[in-house]
Amino acid sequence: MKRTESLPAETRPPGVAAVDPGSVLLPGHDVPLGRYTTVRRLLPQRQRRMVGAWCFVDHFGPDDVAERPGMEVPPHPHTGLQTVTWLLDGEILHRDSLGSVQPIRPGQLNVMTSGHGIAHSERSPATHPPVMHGVQLWVALPDSARAGAPDFAHHADLPRWRDGGLDATLLVGEIAGERSPAVVHTPLVGAQLELTSTAPTDMPLRPDFEYGLLAMSGAAEVDGVSFEPGALLYLGVGRNQLTLRGTPGSQLLLLGGVPFEEPLVMWWNFVGRSHEEVAAAREDWMAGRRFGVVADDPAPPLPAPALPTTRLKARDRSGGLHG
C-alpha cells in the first residue's frame, strides 16, 4: 500500500478520554490512498514510530463502496518490509511481480515479504461487496532478512478461539498457546480481538514485548482509558496481561513485539538503513530495475516522488535521529 510522508496533527479523536499515565494515546490522521480511498494512519507518528517491528499502521473504513470503485492502488514498489493485510469487510485483489494473483476476503490474511524488492497492486474487483473495512500493516525486516528473496503467502485458515468474553483470531506470531502459520522474522504478534460481553476480559501478554491496541469498531477501555476507532493505544513493555472491557461486538487489533532496535530510514514505500540505500531503491524503481512487473495489471507503475532536498536520517523506534 502506498504511503505518504505527512505526519499527523497531535489531536485527540472525538470521544476519546484523557490518556492514562501508564499508556500513550496515538491519534490517527486521514491520508488519501489512491483515487477513492482515505485511510487513518496510526503509525508512524512523532510520539511513537514503532510497536515491536510493526512500523506502519493504516486503518480504512468502514466505507460504503457500493457505487464506487473501492480500492484502486496501482503497481508500486517495496523494500525492507512485510505487508500484512486484514479485512473485516470487503474484498481486495492482490497482484505482484512474483506472478501472484490473490483475492483476500474477511477472515483471511495476506503477507507479502519484499526482501530486496517487490512490486504489487491492490484493487477492489469490479464486482465487490458494498462495504470495505480493514487494515494494512508494515513489519520492518531485520538486517538478517531484509536483503533476501521476495515472497507472498495467503492464509485462509488462522487460529481462532473463545476465552470468556473474547473471540480471538491470531494473524501472526504466538499468543495464549496459539501459533499463526504466517512467517515472520522477529518475535511478533498480531491478533484481532472481538468483545462478546461487557465483563472485563483478560488476555495473557509477554512482558518483554511492547504492545499497542487499535480500535477498529466499537469502543473499549484498558486501565481506565477509553478509546474508539481513530486511535491506537500504546501500552509499552512489562505487562503480563491485558484487561479489556467495552461494548459487545467491538473489534480491536492487538499488535506487539520485542522492541526493534535497528534504526530505520522510512521514505515513500521503502524501509532502509541509509539515505543512499533508499535513493538507490528509488532510482531502480524509476529505471525499471530490481522490482519486476506486476502480473496482469495494465495500469502504469506509480512514479516515485522526488527525494527531499535534505538528507534522509535514520530514526529509532521512538523517533530519535541517527547519523
Image (cartoon, grey):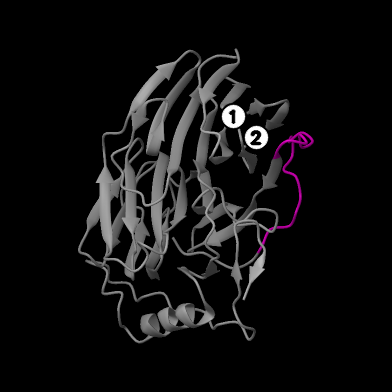
Q: Quadrant of residue 4?
A: bottom right
Please say if 164 is above or below 293: above
Please say if 276 is above or below 200: below
- Residue 209 located left or right of residue 295: right
**In the image, residue 16 lies in the stretch drawn in magenta:** yes
Please say if 62 is above or below 152: above
Quadrant where the N terminus sits is: bottom left
**In the image, residue 315 lies in the stretch drawn in magenta:** no
Q: Which mark is residue 228?
A: 2
Secondary structure beneath dot 1 equals loop
Of marks 1 and 2, which one's residue comes earlier in the chain? 1
Please state the horizontal and vertical placement of residue 260, each as a whole percent of the image: 52, 54
Q: Quadrant of residue 190?
A: top left
> Is the stretch drawn in magenta largely helix, strand or loop?
loop
| Residue extent of the magenta highlight | 7-23
Residue farthest toward the left in the current orientation of the protein: 99
Please state the horizontal and vertical placement of residue 309, each as a whole percent of the image: 63, 86
Count of numbered tags: 2
For marks 1 and 2, give the CA distance: 6 Å
Task: Let me know if residue 92 appears in the view.
Answer: no
Q: Along the line of sight, which residue is nearer the eye, 148 or 105?
A: 148
Please state the horizontal and vertical placement of residue 306, each as a whole percent of the image: 54, 83
Which three-letter amino acid code belongs to the residue tagged 2?
A: Glu
- Residue 167 located left or right of residue 310: left
Q: What residue sits 50% from the left and 51% below the top?
A: 54
Disc 1: which residue: 218
Q: Quadrant of residue 113?
A: bottom left
Q: Are marks 1 and 2 in contact (CB under 8 Å)?
A: yes
Q: Which mark is residue 63?
A: none
> What crowding class fits label 1: few (fewer than 14 Cα within 10 Å), some (14-19), or many (20 or more)?
some
